[in-house]
């Protein structure tokens, strides 16, 4: 298995774990809500912080105001995972490295026209797009030149 396949495998495994954790969190919230049906907690923003006050998890309206966003950060405060819901679409992004360096990023977006998966490595990228109008698989080199595409041009 080459490095890209290993990286994709690790990202997919992490994605499954995060989605499982998210599902358990929702199930726990629903169960707690069922026990206290007369109580309602409303907030514009919920933030979980560590001992130093660094926000590790934030549940808040999306920055563009079109839905909600769950953000998970590492102990240094770097955003690593965020899940966004907007009208007609949902996005899941995983970020490795520093915020100003896109290397080590995986993103999945689904909307009414299809879905797109993008992977960015330190020297190359890959994408899979399944759309109503046209599906495509593509890879690029470190200079951004397409090295593979299917369907072919």
Image (cartoon, rainbow, N blue to C red):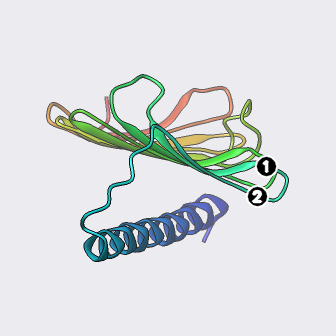
| Image point (76%, 45%), residue name | 77
Q: Is residue 129 visible?
A: no
Mark 1–mark 2 CB contact (< 8 Å) = yes
> Count the marks: how many?
2
Side of 91 relative to 146 (left or right): left
Label 2: how many Cα within 10 Å (few below 14, some 14–19, many 20+): few
Q: Is residue 125 visible?
A: yes
Side of 146 relative to 123 (left or right): left
| Residue hosting label 2 | 50
Q: CA distance from mark 1 to mark 2?
A: 5 Å
Q: Which mark is residue 53?
A: 1
Nearest the camera: 34 or 107? 34
Q: Quadrant of the N terminus?
A: bottom right
Label 1: how many Cα within 10 Å (few below 14, some 14–19, many 20+): few
Q: Secondary structure at mark 2?
A: loop
Nearest the camera: 150 or 91? 91
In percent of width and height, residue 92 lies at 44, 47
Q: Which mark is residue 139?
A: none
């Amino acid at each position: 298995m080459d490095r890209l396949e290993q990286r994709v495998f690790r990202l997919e495994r992490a994605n499954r774990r995060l989605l499982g954790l998210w599902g358990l969190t929702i199930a726990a919230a629903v169960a707690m809500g069922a026990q206290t049906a007369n109580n309602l907690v409303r907030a514009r923003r919920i933030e979980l912080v560590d001992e130093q006050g660094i926000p590790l998890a934030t549940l808040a309206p999306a920055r563009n105001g079109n839905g909600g966003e769950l953000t998970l950060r590492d102990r240094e405060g770097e955003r690593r995972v965020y899940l966004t819901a907007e009208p007609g679409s949902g996005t899941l992004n995983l970020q490795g490295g520093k915020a100003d360096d896109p290397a080590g990023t995986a993103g999945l977006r689904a909307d009414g026209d299809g879905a797109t998966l993008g992977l960015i490595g330190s020297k190359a990228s890959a994408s899979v797009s399944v759309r109503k109008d046209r599906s495509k698989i593509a890879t690029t080199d470190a200079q951004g030149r397409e090295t593979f595409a299917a369907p072919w041009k």
